[in-house]
Amino acid sequence: MSSRSDRMAYILEGAPIGHTKGFNIVSDGIAMGAIQVPGNGLPTVLMADRQPTGGYPKIANVIAADMHRVGQLRPRDEVRFIEVSIAAAVEALREQERWLKTILVA
């Protein structure tokens, strides 16, 4: 994770990702946790103060249940992503909500 990261976006450092057909696409909505790849090829995880729309390719999205983990990253921390199904992402969020209810009751 780059030290240039902020509430808008977490910039991931490493080998740049190339673009096969350029990096400008038609602007569309940006979800929390979307991972965009701008012209410099460095993946960027869009956070709380992200722009509402954007015109860079999006390669993935951090699942809602893991956003708290991304939000705690510090500069030079390493991060890895794994592919999950939509069903697994939904179940992870439900599990997180069940856990949160148990600590709110206590």
Image (cartoon, rainbow, N blue to C red):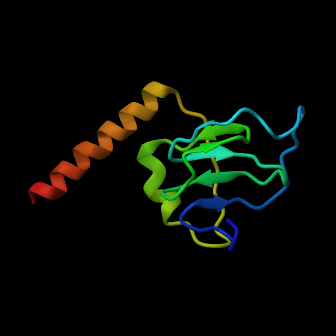
Q: Quadrant of residue 75?
A: bottom right
Q: Position of residue 76 (x, y in %)?
A: 68, 71
In which quadrant is the N terminus drawn? bottom right
Along the horizontal axis of the image, is 48 left or right of 99? Answer: right
Give the residue displayed 88% in from the left and 37% down from the top: 22
Image point (53%, 65%), residue name: 7
In the image, taking residue 102 as reference, residue 57 lies left or right, namely right
The picture places residue 57, in percent across and down from the top left corner, at: 73, 38
Q: Nearer the viewer, residue 105 or 24?
A: 24
Q: Position of residue 74 (x, y in %)?
A: 58, 72
* Residue 103 in which image quadrant: bottom left
106 or 47, which lies in front?
47
Q: Which image quadrant for residue 40?
A: bottom right
How many numbered tags mark residues here?
Answer: 0
**Position of the C terminus by quadrant:** bottom left
Position of residue 48 measured from the top left corner of the image (x, y, whole percent) = 48, 57
Specify whether 3 is left or right of 19: left
Identify the residue shown where x is 89% and y is 32%: 21
Q: Which residue is at a point 54% across and 32% down the rendered structure image?
A: 84
The residue furthest left is: 105
